[in-house]
C-alpha cells in the first residue's frame, strides 16, 4: 500500500462507493499487517479472503488497545497517545506512525464542522488533560491554539480571572471564538460565574474524569444553556483509539467526516450490525497503521437524518457480549 496515496484518497472521499473501496483496502492491509487484528480474525475463524464488503468486516474490541500494541509491521511510530488513568484499568495506547497524518485528520474535520482556527480565538478549559502530556485531545487543542494565534487563545487550568476577562472580551467585541472544555470544568464555570452571554460558542468534550457525578449529555447542556443563555452547546466525540472526531452542533447529534462512520451493533449480538440503537462501532479510515474497525463501549441511537446520538456507555454486565470477541 502506498500510504501517501491512501491518505490523499481518504480525504477526498465523495461517495459511498469511494468509502466502500477504501474500507476494503484498509481491511485487506490490516488483516495481513496488524498482528493483533490478524489474530483476532483467526480467533473468530474468519478467512479475510471471504470478506467481500464492509458490512462483513469484524470490529476489534476497543479493550485490545489496553492490553496489546495495535500497530502494523511498518517503521517505529513517531508518536503515541495514552488514555486517562482515572479507572483501575490499564490505559489504552495508540501508536501513530507520522504526527502529520493525525494533524491532517483532526484539522480537516475541525475545519469542516467548526471553521478555520486561524479565524477564531480558542480557549481550552482542559485541566485534567493538561496533566496528561500523552492525551490526544491535548495534542489536538495545542495545535488548534497554535494556529489560532489570537491573544486570548490558550489553555486555562480553571475559570480564573484571566479566563473570565478573555471570555467577556470576546463576547463584548463579538470576536469569533470557540471555548473547548471538559465537562466538569465547564460545569464549575457555569456554577461559579453564570452570566447571560448569548452568542458564546461552547464545545464540550464529555467526561467528568472522576471529578463530579456523571451527567447525561442533555442535562449537561441544559445547565450550560441556563447559565449563559446560549441556544446550543457543541459537542466533540473522539477518543485515544481514533485519529478522527465527530462533531455535534446541537442536541448531541453527531456527524462524522467522510472518512469516518458509526455503525450500530445489537447489544446482545456483537456481530449484528445496522440496528437503530445499540453499541457504537466506528470505522476510522485514518487509523490505517493501527485498526480502522473498532467496537467501542459507547451506546448510540441513529437519528432520521443519519446523525448519531451518544446515549452513554455499557455497564460491566453488558460488556460481556463485547468481551466474548476477545479470545
Image (tube, rainbow, N blue to C red):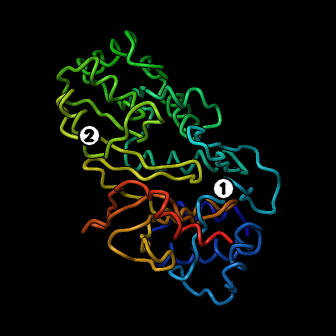
Q: Is residue 248 left or right of residue 143?
A: left
As drawn, the residue found furthest toward the bottom would be: 50
Q: How many marks?
A: 2
Looking at marks 2 and 1 on the same chain, the residue that comes earlier in the sequence is marked by 1
Of all residues shown, which one is farthest toward the top?
Answer: 161
The reply to whether residue 119 is visible in this rendering is no
Estimate the x, y position of residue 138 in percent, counting from the top left: 56, 34
Q: Secondary structure at mark 2?
A: helix
| Separation of marks 2 and 1 at Cα, in angstroms | 31 Å
Question: In the rendered image, which quarter is residue 277 located in?
Answer: bottom left
Question: In this rendering, would 150 be left or right of 94?
Answer: left
Tell me residue 280's x, y (percent): 45, 64
Q: Is residue 15 above or below residue 212?
A: below
Q: Nearer the viewer, residue 145 or 92?
A: 92
Residue 193 place in picture, x, y as percent: 26, 17
Q: Which residue is mark 1?
A: 65
Q: Secondary structure at mark 1?
A: helix
Identify the disc placed on residue 221: 2
Q: Position of residue 322 (x, y in %)?
A: 54, 68
Q: Quadrant of the N terminus?
A: bottom right
Identified at 21% across, 34% down, the residue is 225
Location of the C terminus by quadrant is bottom right
- 112 or 300: nearer the eye? 300
Q: Is residue 140 left or right of residue 121?
A: right
* Residue that appears at 44% across and 45% down: 110
Instruction: Please name the residue shown 64% across and 90% down the image.
Output: 50
Q: Is residue 283 visible?
A: yes
Q: Which mark is residue 315?
A: none
Asked whether the residues under the numbered discs 2 and 1 touch, taking CB atoms below 8 Å apart as contact, a structural biologist would say: no
Q: Residues within 10 Å of mark 2 (few under 14, many from 20)?
A: many
Amino acid at each position: 500500500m502506498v500510504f501517501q496515496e491512501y491518505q490523499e484518497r481518504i480525504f477526498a472521499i465523495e461517495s459511498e462507493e469511494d468509502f466502500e473501496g477504501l474500507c476494503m483496502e484498509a481491511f485487506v492491509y490490516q488483516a495481513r499487517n496488524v498482528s493483533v487484528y490478524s489474530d483476532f480474525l483467526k480467533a473468530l475463524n474468519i478467512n479475510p479472503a471471504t470478506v467481500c464488503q464492509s458490512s462483513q468486516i469484524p470490529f476489534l474490541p476497543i479493550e485490545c488497545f489496553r492490553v496489546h500494541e495495535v500497530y502494523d509491521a511498518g517503521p517505529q511510530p513517531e508518536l503515541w497517545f495514552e488514555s486517562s488513568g482515572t479507572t483501575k484499568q490499564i490505559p489504552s495506547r495508540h501508536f501513530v506512525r507520522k504526527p502529520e497524518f493525525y494533524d491532517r485528520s483532526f484539522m480537516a474535520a475541525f475545519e469542516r464542522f467548526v471553521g478555520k482556527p486561524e479565524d477564531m480565538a480558542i480557549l481550552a478549559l482542559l485541566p485534567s488533560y493538561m496533566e496528561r502530556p500523552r492525551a490526544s485531545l491535548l495534542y489536538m487543542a495545542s495545535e488548534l491554539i497554535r494556529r489560532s494565534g489570537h491573544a486570548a487563545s490558550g489553555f486555562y487550568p480553571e475559570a480564573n480571572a484571566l479566563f473570565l476577562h478573555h471570555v467577556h472580551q470576546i463576547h463584548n467585541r463579538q470576536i469569533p471564538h470557540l471555548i473547548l472544555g471538559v465537562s466538569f470544568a465547564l460545569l464549575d464555570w457555569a456554577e461559579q460565574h453564570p452570566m447571560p452571554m448569548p452568542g458564546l460558542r461552547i464545545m464540550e468534550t464529555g467526561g467528568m474524569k472522576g471529578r463530579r457525578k456523571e451527567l447525561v449529555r442533555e442535562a449537561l447542556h441544559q445547565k450550560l444553556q441556563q447559565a449563559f443563555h446560549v441556544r446550543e452547546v457543541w459537542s466533540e466525540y473522539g477518543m485515544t483509539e481514533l485519529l478522527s472526531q465527530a462533531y455535534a452542533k446541537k442536541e448531541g447529534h453527531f456527524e462524522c467526516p467522510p472518512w469516518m462512520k458509526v455503525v450500530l451493533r445489537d447489544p446482545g449480538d456483537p456481530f449484528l450490525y445496522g440496528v437503530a440503537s445499540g453499541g457504537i462501532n466506528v470505522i476510522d479510515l485514518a487509523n490505517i497503521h493501527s485498526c480502522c474497525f473498532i467496537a467501542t463501549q459507547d451506546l448510540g441511537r441513529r437519528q432520521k437524518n443519519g446523525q448519531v446520538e451518544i446515549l452513554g456507555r455499557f455497564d460491566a454486565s453488558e460488556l460481556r457480549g463485547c468481551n466474548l470477541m476477545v479470545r
